[in-house]
Image (tube, helix red, strand yellow):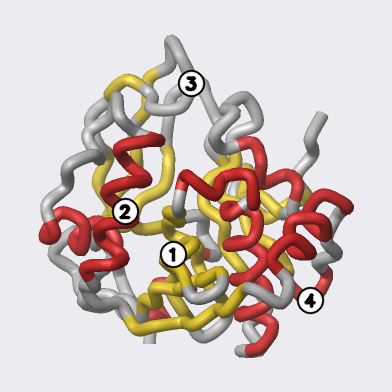
């Protein structure tokens, strides 16, 4: 049975990632209730979610924001990724918890956004804003809790679908940035997808020209959704 999904085009606004650019999105009907199976199909068409809004970029004269995914069984860590994992080996525990508000997670999120996004609108989010951003009633979301020697190190928010995990957002203890928590969180999600026998880990948008988003090219063999099909990402 096919599902028909009305699509809407958002208004143009200043791009959050690239200077002197304007962005707009194609947005799925916000009144629709999806489920993990339908969302898996949408991910395969280049969409992703923020809260319950499902969208993909549709910018005029620009295709820099490209949805990305990793075939987890083909992934081989590079030297720096191996080094990051070795730093935490024997000290790290990983537990995937169903999405729920926990004060400890929320306080870490507040600390992270205050340090990393002080100039944006994310800092001082209320508990309701925090959960509305990270979770959705139709998504099967996990807060993947990473602890170092028992102390909360990072939380990787990820959605589980029949054929994939979709990494939504990661926040971590900025005092431990030297331990590469962002890298460790991605590696933990790759391992989780492999354990759950899910072939894909979606990593959100890869933007070559954005320092915040270009790092995804380090996870190989990365694929990007371009011109309606999935292709190998090219760094050059």
Question: Which comes sooner in the sequence, label 1 or label 2?
Answer: 2
Classify the position of the C terminus by image quarter.
Answer: top right
Q: Earlier in the sequence, mark 3 or mark 1?
A: 3
Callout 4: SS: helix
Query: Of 72 and 80, which appears nearest the observer?
Result: 80
Above-or-below relation of 169 to 135: above
| 1 sits to left or right of 86 | left
Label 3 CA crowd tier, 10 Å (few <14, some 14–19, many 20+): some
In the image, what residue occupies the spot 53% across and 73% down? Answer: 165
Left or right, 137 with respect to 85, comes to left
Q: Residue at x 62, y 74 (%)?
A: 92
Observer-nearest of 50 and 109: 109
Q: Which residue is mark 1?
A: 155
Q: Which residue is denoted by mark 4 in the rendering?
A: 73
Q: Which residue is mark 3?
A: 18
> Helix, strand or loop at disc 2?
helix
CA–CA distance in space, label 3 to label 1: 27 Å
Q: Quadrant of the N terminus?
A: bottom left
Image coords of residue 211 (percent x, y): 59, 28
At mark 1, the secondary structure is strand
Query: Which residue is drawn at the image coordinates 65% and 74% (left, top)?
Result: 91
The reply to whether residue 6 is in sight is no
Mark linked to residue 109:
2
Mark 1 and mark 2 in contact? Answer it, CB < 8 Å: yes
Looking at the image, residue 165 sits to the left or right of residue 23; the answer is: right
């Amino acid at each position: 049975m096919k599902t028909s999904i009305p699509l809407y085009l958002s208004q143009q606004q200043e791009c959050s990632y690239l200077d002197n650019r304007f962005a707009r999105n194609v947005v799925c009907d916000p009144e629709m209730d999806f489920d993990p199976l339908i969302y898996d199909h949408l991910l395969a068409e280049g969409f992703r979610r923020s809260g319950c809004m499902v969208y993909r970029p549709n910018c005029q004269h620009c295709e820099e924001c490209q949805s990305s995914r990793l075939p987890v069984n083909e992934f081989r860590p590079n030297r720096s990724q191996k080094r990051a994992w070795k730093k935490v080996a024997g000290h790290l525990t990983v537990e995937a918890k169903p999405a729920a508000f926990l004060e400890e997670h929320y306080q870490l999120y507040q600390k992270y956004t205050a340090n990393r996004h002080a100039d944006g609108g994310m800092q001082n989010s209320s508990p309701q804003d925090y959960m509305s951003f990270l979770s959705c009633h139709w998504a099967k979301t996990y807060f993947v809790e990473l602890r170092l020697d028992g102390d909360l190190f990072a939380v990787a928010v990820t959605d589980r679908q029949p054929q994939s995990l979709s990494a939504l957002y990661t926040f971590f203890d900025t005092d431990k940035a030297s331990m590469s928590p962002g890298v460790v969180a991605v590696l933990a999600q790759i391992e989780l997808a492999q354990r759950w026998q899910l072939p894909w880990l979606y990593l959100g948008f890869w933007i070559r020209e954005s320092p915040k988003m270009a790092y995804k090219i380090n996870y190989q063999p990365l694929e990007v959704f371009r011109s309606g099909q999935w292709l190998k990402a090219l760094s050059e």
